[in-house]
Image: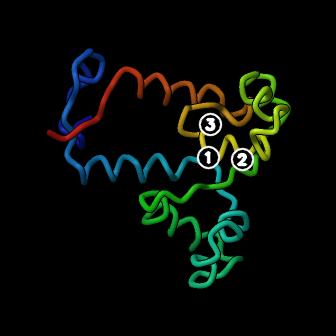
Amino acid sequence: MQILGISGDQLRGSSDISVNPPALMLLIKQALHGIPFDGELYAKNNPDVAKVYGSRDTNALRRHFIERGYIEGRQVPYAGFDPEYYAAKNSDVVKSYLAGELKSLYNHYAATGINEFRAPSAEVESSVAGWADLSRRKKLVKN
């Protein structure tokens, strides 16, 4: 917590905390290193990036996502998306899909579910739940 300039007690407390933007960016980049990444899918969904970095250099594509893509709002298609799991955990999404309001369960996850902390598979459920809990408990803001 030293890099963020906050104490463990502040993090566990109930009030808002202030975080230095460069430190927050460093924390975000470190977290992005831990997420599953499929370079081929990223290149396919970001042809402008593929034009510059190619579609086969996964390391270069991952670096782009971590350094720029995430901040630009680019999504990382999650190759481990499990539609059966997602359907079982999100009956509201299934209802919308069956009503023809959604193109696919994955499209919901990529456009909305990821921002609502909906887990795409059982293998990352606890990790997503941890981020959701942190998000609910804290607002990381710079005054």
Q: Where is residue 108 in the image (x, y as percent from the top left)?
A: 69, 41
Give the side of residue 24 with respect to residue 76, left or right. left
- The residue identified by callout 1 is 111
> Label 3 is placed on what type of residue?
Gly
Q: Which residue is drawn at 47% across and 46% down?
A: 31
- The residue identified by callout 3 is 113
Circle 1/circle 3 CB separation < 8 Å: yes
> Label 1 is placed on what type of residue?
Ala
- Mark 3 lies on a secondary structure that is helix
The answer for how far apart the CA atoms under marks 2 and 1 are is: 6 Å
Instruction: Locate the N terminus and report the quarter of the image it occupies.
Output: top left
For residue 63, above or below residue 85: below
- The residue identified by callout 2 is 107
Instruction: Locate the C terminus and report the quarter of the image it occupies.
Output: top left
Q: Which residue is drawn at 69% across and 77% down?
A: 55
Question: Around disc 1, counting alpha carbons within 10 Å, would you say few (fewer than 14), some (14 to 19), or many (20 or more)?
Answer: few
For residue 138, above or below residue 38: above
Q: Nearer the viewer, residue 61 or 8?
A: 61
Give the side of residue 127 with respect to residue 16, left or right. right
The answer for how far apart the CA atoms under marks 1 and 3 are is: 6 Å
